[in-house]
Image (spheres, coloured by chain):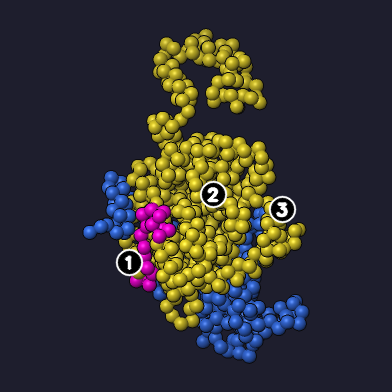
Amino acid sequence: MTPTGRDQVLGRVREALKQRAKLEHPGRLTVDRSQPPVDSFRDRFTQNGGEVAGPEADPREWLVRLLSGLSSEQGSTTSTIAPGAHVPASWIQGLPVAGPEVASVGVSMAWGAAGDSGSVLLESTGGRRVQLLPPVHVVFVPESRVRPTLGEALEAAHPALPATLGVHSGPSKSADIGSTLVKGVHGPGRIIAVLVPAPS
Amino acid sequence: MDVRSNEYKAHSKAIIRDSPGVRDAIRGATVAFDQARKNAYAEVDADAWRRWAEGVKNHTLTHLDRYLEEAEARLTENGCTVHWASTGGDVRTVVTEIARARAAGSVVKGKSMLSEEVDLNPALERAGIKVVETDLGEYILQLLNEAPSHILGPAIHRSLEDVQQLFSRELGTDASGTPDALANAARKRLRQEFLEADMGITGANFVVAESGTIALIENEGNIRLSTSLPKVHVVLVGIEKIIPRMSDLAGFVQLTARAGTGQPIGCFVSLIQGPAAESGDDGPDEVHVVFVDNGRTDVLSDDHAWETLRCVRCGACLNSCPVYRQTGGHAYGWVYSGPIGAVLDPGLLGLKEAMPLPFASTLCGACFDACPVRIPIPELLLYWRGRAHEAGLTPPSERALLRTFAGVATRPGLYPTAGRIGTKVAAGPLGKKLPLLNDWAEHRALPKPSERTFRRLWKDGIQ
């Protein structure tokens, strides 16, 4: 039977390792987890170029204020939202909704967040287009689900991981044009994490 | 990409002579990145992180067959199709067939050095498939029909003026457009491509064996889009990209970002387990993972060079290198340039094809200090130089000189005489003609040798 690509590659790997001493895994990496997670998240996410709001007791009211602010910035156009699947219906009730390809603001509910890297964790089941296409991305973050470190957040997510877990830590940016930093190259140029109580 | 490393000397001279703008642009970018890395390392216990990462990679590489099998099993359970490619030709065949099976007419690509290694884009184009690079730097290069010059910032050799002219021609932007305006134009054009593409192709920064997770790090968001909007996603994975456990991933993601750009983490990290499985997930319905060898097992079997496979493709060594800084990546003549290129290319391509890259270095060691996985690049450069000497690949005059030196230095009777003669010759008019000294001596006066040699002083009792 002719060897498959798999047999060939694995065969060569085993051959290459025949005389190699096996080296042990060094174990876990110790990282600093001394700062309270929400404080750490607020500092880091802001340093990364993101914005942090809250704790916000009335998420719907917060969205209304944001949309009104955006509308007045951009003249008379109505600002619309594209809500993700995990955002509670009461938080977006009555607000102007549009598809993610055309909406001004994508609104997501984070699975959780990490303090040391300043990251929000987003499940693909919430809707990827909502997280990526609109120029502004609002992410509601339940305060109780902010973990001290990215490592802890990922281990808590595993093994029940969705098809894709997006770890977003700031606005989209690039320095590819003349080494000058520009924002919002492909993904949202503005990302706002709004701390909220855990949804009921 | 054609291998043109043998032309390094002529090519680098030409770049320095004819394109001073390139040197300025590269220096500006690399110095900034290098300083950012140093600041980012200083914020954490970088030494401990680097030793840990080295240890995890070494463990994985010495158990690679086991981890490849585990990764394949988990990825398959997650709904991915796993393919194995021995050569570049195999990769081209596999990917073209996936595209044909789905009647894919257009592809959006995230930046992948591996895809450059195997010349994937031309193969897809020959099959009638449109390929669009979506990383802003790679998009610029695609329009210019140029090769990347740096692992992370492929177009850093191009100035703002270059891009203004290019986009004015290709996208109809203002000839004096600001970076924001130019980026906006590219975003609009590429947004259409993302929405219409049938297939997305990316590399992978890491693949976690324990969970079957493909990890991709970026700042723009083009990888999140390339892996979310098209219905098919193809992932090219060099077999050395495997890491064992989910508990290893956060450390590697953060260390790679700190090393490459000085950030605590990339703006977007995609952790992909498989195709969209649940309602509400608007992602791809097919994910194909291609494990690629393409010379990596040759490197793995070399008792010295195997350490090169720890590389996480962060570009930190390029940013630290005083030699790379003079020319950028094109002078090196292949996909991997700078210090990592000088030690990896001989292993992947063969030493003859990669000459004289192991010699394109002052052995200053800055690359080792920068490397997040502590690849001993200076030692590996010496290793490959020794191999080049043994294989007769170094210039005959240099080999003759070294043989003469060895002959003299190992004869205690000859050495003092040779020393006296040597210093007199080097200081005289003939000195400038000697190999190794000639270029260096062209613009410098050599120091005046002492009246008495050290041996003489010692005998006389040094005062």
Judging by the rendered image, the residue that carries numbered circle 3 is: B161
How many other residues sit within 10 Å of disc 1, few (<14), some (14-19) or many (≥20)? some
Q: Which color is chain B depicted in?
A: yellow
> Front-most of A69 and B200?
B200
Query: At label 2, which amino acid type do we have?
Result: Ala
Q: Is residue B303 left or right of residue B147?
A: left
Which chain's residue wears label 3? B
Residue most toward the left? A1
Q: Is B381 situated left or right of B18 in this image? A: left
Near-viewer residue (B297 or A84): B297
Residue B97 location, x and y as percent? 41, 65
Residue A181 visible from this viewpoint: yes
Residue at left offset 57%, top offset 77%: A130
Q: Which amino acid does label 3 sit on?
A: Glu
Q: Name the residue under label 2.
A: B316
Q: Which shade of the palette goes to chain A?
A: blue
Of badges 1 and 3, the one in the foreground is 3
Quarter of the image for residue B243 reads bottom left
Q: Mark 1 — residue? A: B73
- Amino acid type of disc 1? Ala
- Residue visible at 49% across and 47% down? B2
Q: How many marks?
A: 3
The chain under label 2 reads B
Q: Give the range drawn in magenta.
A: B77-93
Q: How far apart are marks 1 and 3 (CA)?
A: 50 Å
Label located before the other in sequence (2 or 1): 1
Residue B14: x and y in percent read: 62, 38
Q: Is residue B80 covered in magenta?
A: yes
How much space separates mark 2 and mark 1, taking CA atoms?
Answer: 33 Å
